[in-house]
Image (cartoon, grey):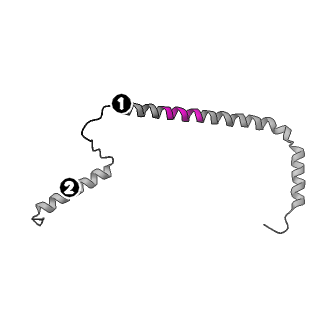
Amino acid sequence: LPDDLPFEELLIRAKNLYRDYPPESISADVFNFDQKRRSKEQEWRQKALQSRLERERMKKLKVALPQSRLPSYRLRSYRTITVVTILAIGLYAFLKSGSGLN
């Protein structure tokens, strides 16, 4: 910050702005803006509540589904499938080449 701040100019500008745009003239705009903000917040809360209730309902449905006795090993990504395939082929080639553990 500079040592010689123009405080007098700032005060004069503030006084002029206050005179040109008094707080009473914009109170209706502020009220409307606040009402819109509150309604959007209420909509957001309602959507969040609906989403949470839907997740809980889906969780209850998942619990109700019969579970198989054998665990189902699911491969979740192509990276996993690729790595497992490469390792299996490599192990097979190593053991088949004769320089295996025999």
Q: Are marks 2 and 1 in contact (CB under 8 Å)?
A: no
User: Which amino acid is tagged 2?
Assistant: Ala
Of 102 and 10, nearer the camera is 102
The residue at 50%/35% (across/down) is 52
The residue at 52%/31% (across/down) is 50
Residue at image mark 2: 88
Q: Position of residue 3 (x, y in %)?
A: 83, 69
Label 2, label 1: how far apart the Cα atoms are: 37 Å
Could you say whether the residue bearing mark 1 is in a helix, strand or loop? helix
**Where is the N terminus found, in terms of image quarters?**
bottom right
| Residue 72 falls in image quadrant | top left
Residue at image mark 1: 64
The residue at 29%/35% (across/down) is 67
Q: Which residues are magenta?
A: 45-53
Of 92 and 53, nearer the camera is 53
| Residue 2 falls in image quadrant | bottom right
